[in-house]
Image (spheres, rainbow, N blue to C red):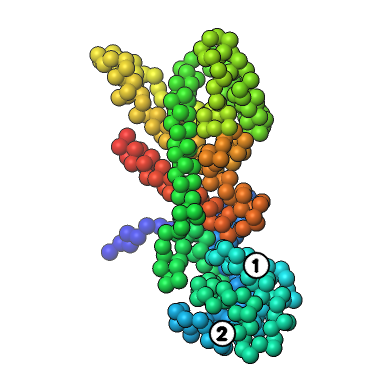
Amino acid sequence: MSDMSPAVLLTNTGVPMKAQLRRIERVSQLKSLALILPLLLFLIVTFMLPIAAMLRQSVSNPEVVRVMPATLQALKHWNGKTMPDEATSRALLSDLTRAGGDGYALAAAGKRLNMEIAGYRSLVMKTVRHLPEERAAPSARAALLTVDDRWGDPAYWHAIARNASPTTPFYLLASLDHNVNDQGEVVHSEPDRAIYLDVFARTFGMSLVVTLVCVLLGFPVAYLLATLPTRKSNLLMILVLLPFWTSVLVRVAAWIVLLQSGGLINSALIGLGLTREPLELVFNRTGVYISMVHILLPFMILPIYSVMRGISPSYMRAAISLGSHPILSFWRVYFPQTVAGLAAGGLLVFILSIGYYITPALLGGPKDQMVSYFVAFYTNTTVNWGMATSLGTLLLLATLILYAVYNRLIGANRLQLG
């Protein structure tokens, strides 16, 4: 019986051809990896590591643990209903005495506890100042109550107990207008502190309005760019790209000049007799919308235009030649092919909008500020990194969800077209 197995192809050196091809493929992959390695390292250092640090900072809670370790250990056995026992009070006095030499750590712990109960920082500092005077007190509990009777309120001890872990959901919960009560339950924040859900709703609402206006204005412009002759199309493209050559801050300042009561727009409206008094177009939401649409409109036009350029005009001509009305042909034949560009432009504009800071800060009023304003406030003014990073984390999460929804919708649309 003859051997029917296929012959093994060999190279000139006697190495099997298949093994040689695999070796060449591995070398090619290693070379490609070496080429992109610097870019990968750059992205990790400048993008991934800061995001990881932000996510970690949003749950980081080392201040009280560092200053009051003995107190936290003693509070593990506390029933939470009555005044802590003498051992716990003695542990607190010991912790505060030891921390008195590290003013920065003590101030950080007081600031953290002040987020739980207003006035806690001053209580901690007052207690540290009066410690030498109260050493003759009959007990540690009596010494604390002599300094300030607030130490007799279990709520102040609960605030310390809630910070027994170096990580905490406090900032993320506060960013969603919730907190943990003395019983360990997640509850809604007090009305005077429950502001962030409204801020997030305002941010997404304003971003949605800006995105929709950009769609209404950008789609016709993109269609003109894709259908006009080359010379006219190039001129229109220059006008679309022109805002990119000017700083955002300069454009916002220009809109302040144009939209103010004595500005060019109001002067023109009054001169034409369209209005008798200047319209309020600045330092309110109207001014914010106008400026944001002007800045973000190119980001809507370009993705739509890139898709329209790849659509053959023969589809429309074929539909019309078969008796379809031009408007109906546009809606049923041309428009479905532009959905990918609309989705990409809409996602890009919406994501850029929810992170806007300069435009609402300069052109808007107090009720027009978005989440990014509070991130900047906690970063630059109060130096509350926990709240700043938690708000930023929620914005990042919203962006990732939007991107996932976009990928799902575009994937489903491609399957339908296929």
Q: Count of labels shown?
A: 2
Q: Residue at x 54, y 14 (%)?
A: 276
The percent position of residue 94, horizontal first and vertical second, equals 66, 84
Category of crowding for the residue at label 1, using alpha-carbon neighbours closer than 10 angstroms: few (below 14), some (14–19), many (at least 20): some
Q: Nearer the viewer, residue 329 or 115?
A: 115
Q: Residue furthest right?
A: 101
Q: Residue at x 46, y 63 (%)?
A: 179
> The residue tagged with tag 1: helix, strand or loop?
helix
| Residue beneath disc 1 | 122
- Image-quadrant location for residue 314: top left
Q: Nearer the viewer, residue 68 or 165?
A: 68
Q: Residue at x 68, y 71 (%)?
A: 125
Q: Residue at x 61, y 75 (%)?
A: 148
For the residues labelled 1 and 2, say whether their Cβ atoms are less than 8 Å apart: no
| Residue beneath disc 2 | 88
The percent position of residue 80, horizontal first and vertical second, equals 46, 79
293 over 17 or under it: above or below? above
Q: Amino acid at mark 1?
A: Ser
* Quarter of the rendering occupied by the C terminus: top left
Q: Can the viewer see residue 312 in this picture?
A: yes
- Image-quadrant location for residue 145: bottom right
Q: Can the viewer see residue 40 in this picture?
A: no
> The residue tagged with tag 2: helix, strand or loop?
helix
321 over 5 or under it: above or below? above
- Tag shown at residue 302: none
Q: Residue furthest top?
A: 272
* Quarter of the rendering occupied by the N terminus: bottom left
379 over 352 or under it: above or below? below
